[in-house]
Amino acid sequence: MSDWVPTTCMRCAVGCGHLQRGADIGTGIDVVRGDAAHPVNQGLACQRGVRETSDPQGEWLTRPMVRRDGELVSTTWDVALSEALRAFQGAVDSAGEVAVLGSGQQTNEAAYALGKLARGGFGTRYYDANTTLCMASAVTAYYQAFGSDAPPCSYDDIPEAEAHVVWGANPAAAHPVMFRWIRQAASDEGVELLAVDPVETETAEAADAHVAPDPGQDLALARAVLARIVETDRVDEGFVAEATEGFDDLRDALPDSESAAARAGVSTADVDRLADAFERDALCYWGMGVNQHVQGTDIARALIDLCLATGNLRPGSGPFSLTGQANSMGTRVCSCKGTWPGQRPFADPDERRTVAEQWDIPVERLPPDPGPGPVGIAEALGDEVEVAYTVATNPVAGMPDASTAKENLEDVFLVAQDAFRTETTDLADVVLPAATWGESEGTAMNMERTVSRVRAATEAPSGVWSDLRIISTVGARLFPDLFDDPDPDPEALFDEFAGLTAGTVADMSGITYDRLEDLKALRWPAPDAETDAGYRYYDGDDGNRGYVPRDEDEPAPDETGEESWSFPTASGLAGFSTARQEGLPEPVDDEYPLTLTTARESDAYNTGVRSRDVDDLDPVVARINPETVAESDAIRDGEVVVESRRDAVRASVDPDAAVPEGLVWLPIHHPATNRLTIDALDPQSKEPNFKQCAVRLVAPADETAATADAPVRADD
């Protein structure tokens, strides 16, 4: 019988420890369970993580493929790599651009290697990852407010909070283990759970109160709450004076609470309920309902403002963005997509020289800026960009206005690397099959900055290589000065990028594979071999700079001083913001009178590549309020066509009172959904406005879009 192998679940960003056991005959994972010794989850595990690890429903890729006479055919690694390398080299030689799209589903080591190849090899500014589609607004808000990305708080703060405010997120569906902790904490006497969402989600059903703003009006609501706190003299003036700047400007820019509440579509009683929550020790969690908005950065800043104004930047409180993909945080810290490793500023000449010296390349090879973001990359395909390389991502379904993204991908030579067949691999000229969870070695980083090991419990099938090996082989063939080993040891890559973080705000130089072997998980910043970080920016009255020992037997330091805070900003202070609610990029009108929103389901994986068949697709299920259904004459035998200004898709109607009137709810996991969405961007974060666009319901025989009966495919 195979041995149990401790590893990290890669289903979502909670970062649970798993024990996996490989099959006794052949390859594959036989049994999965939670790891009771892991400090993150202490044995808890959700069934979807277990199921999608041991028995994913997607179609595995087991052989490299190349396109011949318009069809993908199996081939050898030598042939597939030769064709990919020829295309890459041709673009480099002709001074064309190679676009690279990575993912939050790779290990830290593979993400770092891909960024090294993109930035230090190709020297391309057309590099990003699908994490920008999910988290870029939160990232930008953290940088603007605190000078560094990532939440200041952690899971340790959940049981200490007196109020849990979940805003534009549904952790009951997306992060079930974490939500169990939140719900358990909220069950204590005097502790409350509030949900803010236009839809009555599973989280809202479990909450003590549900506040339902009109779609896209979150900034108006956040400003109403802060205005009410100011009007009732509940600002933590001592904290604001000591640790922040810009509050007077914000106070002057605030609307009155009553008018802001009216714009948000909520009652003043709802505003009071939220204001009361922030007056206590409150954790404010948010997700894609905030980030995926043309003002996503402004909304995230406004939630941070609420925490700052009420002094909720201490243990047991604070702003806590909920990350979707398992290693989105690792991609942000390690992959060189928006900053250099360790959050080194991209444009800083000294930081660029440090990276170039580490990589032993001319600094001039590094691109001048981080690039236009995923949507901008898609727009450049076939124009500036000649070749595209996608790794563990499926932009044909995951990009907004996905039909246009698909058309643009058809205009370039496409190399797609993935573990499962997707709509993007179907479109590719070369397909490179990659190992997945349970077959790969490395590390991952969860949403609360905790790094843990990812281990292989089984061999990958013989025709499948790890992401790291594929990327490094491409790098070694094209840029031997940059990659000296086509199949490197993951530990060597970890040590390399961890070394590059030394002395930065995201210092991981004190984390090693040996320490992770002993402790299973460590949280950054960890600048030395003893540190395991706690609450960021907070200098507690124990004088411990926010670092806490994980060993419960180790005595706490003596209490030596008062509370204080420090931030890696120019002033050393946290910053307030002044933005106010603006209009949506595509408001409803007489022609398109309904609002489309998109969200996750509990039992489907991202664009569904691990939880559905690519070919055998049922119509997407549209959840619509029964009153809206009754008012429509377009529904035929339970089906309708949902049509936007970009495309139309056939849908099966699910009348659901949890969805407000005038709203159409579609799951992000179906490849048809993003054919409808709009590619309008938050100008600060370059994150798309996935959550609101105008649609109408059309009878199936009357649809105007030519592709209504041909759903496109998917992006992780």
Image (cartoon, grey):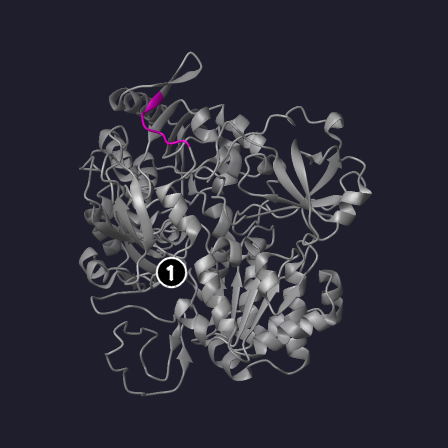
| Percent x, y of residue 577 | 57, 65
The residue nearer to you, when weighing 344 against 12, is 12
Q: Which residue is mark 1?
A: 44
Compared with 502, 475 (above or below) is above
Is residue 62 located in the magenta-colored stretch of the structure? yes
How crowded pointer 1 is (Cα within 10 Å; few <14, some 14-19, many 20+) is rated as some
Q: In which quadrant is the N terminus drawn?
A: top left
Q: Is residue 617 left or right of residue 624?
A: left
The residue drawn where x is 32% and y is 34% is 434
Q: Amino acid at mark 1?
A: Leu
Q: Quadrant of residue 219?
A: bottom right
The residue drawn where x is 42% and y is 11% is 69
Q: Is residue 361 left or right of residue 693?
A: left
Q: Is residue 354 left or right of residue 175?
A: left
Predominant SS along the magenta part: loop
The residue nearer to you, when weighing 496 against 716, is 716
The part of the chain drawn in magenta is 59-65
The residue drawn where x is 55% and y is 60% is 300
Q: Quadrant of residue 701?
A: top right
